[in-house]
Each structure stands twice: as structure tokens, then as C-alpha cells.
Amino acid sequence: MTSITFVGIGAIGLPLATQLVRAGHSVAGVDPMPAAHARAAAVGVPVVPAITDAERTEMVIAMVATPDQLDTLVTQAGDSVHGQTWVIMSTVGPESVAAQAARLTAAGARVADAPVTGGVARAKTGELVIFLSGEQATVEEVTPVLESFGTVRVVGSRVGDGQSVKVVNQHLCSVHIVAAAEALSLAASLGLDQAEVLDLIGGGAAGSWMLADRGPRMLDDDAQVTSTINIFVKDSGLVASAAAASGADVPLLAVAQARYAEAAASGLGQSDDSQVIATYRG
């Protein structure tokens, strides 16, 4: 059993904290949102509003939303991180995770970089894929804990390697969602029933995980929110920044990024990311 502080009891954070409890770990949460406290209490996870209010644990898992939130978290934690192991599971990009890992290491913590892919549905079933990187000893320490969430893939020895793999992952996710929206919009323009088209093409060469997962929600004006437009505004921006820093040419990403920005500007920022299809409705 490991004592763990889990920061960020959101759509993915809550099922992950639940998986840790089921695996027998001692888990406490940190989240500033009162609604998160009630949700976590229902699965046996006590929650405090800030990390400065949390009791000291062996490990801290961070699942915050943005680089700025991670920066604030590390600042608030200060020197209390000495001797702890920090696992950064947020999608924040290689530059951010390297900068915060340097601060944590200087204060005496060990750091693992471990972003995930698979979405809320697979977080609930323990079927995520975790892109883990860091020093070997730290990787070996955190792997048994992270296996509660799914399959751990060790992708490198540097903190930042995991984020780099996640950047590539989010490039494809960003483009695939917009491509699915554009294809379904084309189907409507051709006078076809979009639901029938989904059924016809989903199992063929044109099928994709994103088409199967997001496609039905694109046809639902009241789609359940599992990942927001704003998340993909952020993530496509991280991809664009990483591409610019490395000199990579990503024209398809630029098209997708513009669609998420357009959807957010029209007031859909907190809607499910599938609703990027609204940008094709004029």
C-alpha cells in the first residue's frame, strides 16, 4: 500500500482515484471545486481544496488541466515535496513538465512523467495506456501504482519523453475528431442520413477509434461531456508549440486547431469536444 495525494478530481481524475482505492492504496484528493469533494466522498476519497491543506503522503499524482495549474501546484507545494515522488499525469507538454520537474527535483522530490490516453471510458475500466518516462529507479517505484490504471509503456529515461509521445497522440486525436466532424457534415450535405453513414463506414478502412467514439455524440445536440472543446484548444496549442520548437511542419494540426478555436469563440468551450461539428453548420 502506498499513501497517495491525488490532485485533480475531475472527469478522469475521479475514476483514477477510485482505481487506486480499489487497489488498496491510501488515497486523499486535492481539488478546489466543491462538487469534486462530494463526488470523491462517494467513493471513499477525502478531498481538501489545496495541497497546502493535505497531509503528507509518499506520492503525489498530479492530474491538473493546464501548464499554469501545474506551475501553481508546484509553487504551493514548495519545500514540502522533499522526499516525495511526484507523478505528473497531466497533458502539459514537454517544456512545462521539464520546467516543473526541475523545480521539484531541486526541492528534493523524485519525478515521473506519465500522461495517459484512452479517455474517461477507459479510465473507468482501468484500460488506459500510460506513457511513462523518468529515471529508472523512479519508473520502477511508480509502475506498480500506475498499473492500477491500465497498461504502462515506458517510453524514455528523460522526464518529458512521456509528454512528447502524448503530443504526437494529441496531434492525431485533434485531427481525427475534426476529420470525423467534417466527414459527417459532408454526408449531410450529400443528403445522406448521418447515423446510417456511421454504421456503414465505421467498420471499414475509413473507420477510426475517434469516429466510433465521437461520431454518435456529434449527432447528439445534448452530448454528455467527457472532454471539452477547451481541452482540445489547450492540447492542440501544446502540439503546435512543440512542433514549432522542433521545426516540425503540421499543417493538418493547424486546420484542426482553428476549428477548436472557432467552436470555443462561439460559446462551445465547455461543450463536449464532439460538438466541434457545429463549426460546419454555418
Image (cartoon, rainbow, N blue to C red):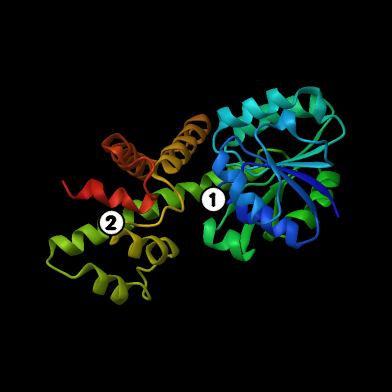
Q: What is the count of numbered marks?
A: 2
Crowd tier of the residue under label 1, counting other residues whose Cα lies within 10 Å: few below 14, some 14–19, many 20 or above: some
Viewer-side residue, 112 vs 27: 27
CB under 8 Å between discs 1 and 2: no
Q: CA distance from mark 1 to mark 2?
A: 20 Å
Q: Is residue 58 above or below residue 195?
A: above
Q: Who's the residue at 74% across and 57% down the image?
A: 21
User: What amino acid is labelled 2 in the image?
Assistant: Asp
Q: Looking at the picture, how far across and down is residue 11, in whole percent?
A: 54, 50
Residue 146 in sight: yes
Q: Is residue 151 above or below residue 251?
A: below
The image's mark for residue 134 is none
Q: Relative to residue 247, is residue 263 drawn left or right?
A: left
Residue topped by disc 1: 11
Viewer-side residue, 26 vs 136: 26
Crowd tier of the residue under label 2, counting other residues whose Cα lies within 10 Å: few below 14, some 14–19, many 20 or above: few
Q: Looking at the picture, how far across and down is residue 112, in whole percent?
A: 74, 42
The image's mark for residue 221 is 2
Q: Looking at the picture, how far across and down is residue 210, in whole percent?
A: 42, 60
Q: Relative to residue 263, is residue 2 drawn left or right?
A: right
**Pointer 1 or 2: first along the chain:** 1
Q: Who's the residue at 66% across and 38% down the image?
A: 160
Q: Who's the residue at 80% across and 60% down the image?
A: 24
Q: Secondary structure at mark 2?
A: loop
Q: Quadrant of residue 233?
A: top left
Residue 130 in sight: no
User: What amino acid is labelled 1 in the image?
Assistant: Ala
Q: Looking at the picture, how far across and down is residue 260, in whole percent?
A: 34, 41
Q: Secondary structure at mark 1?
A: loop
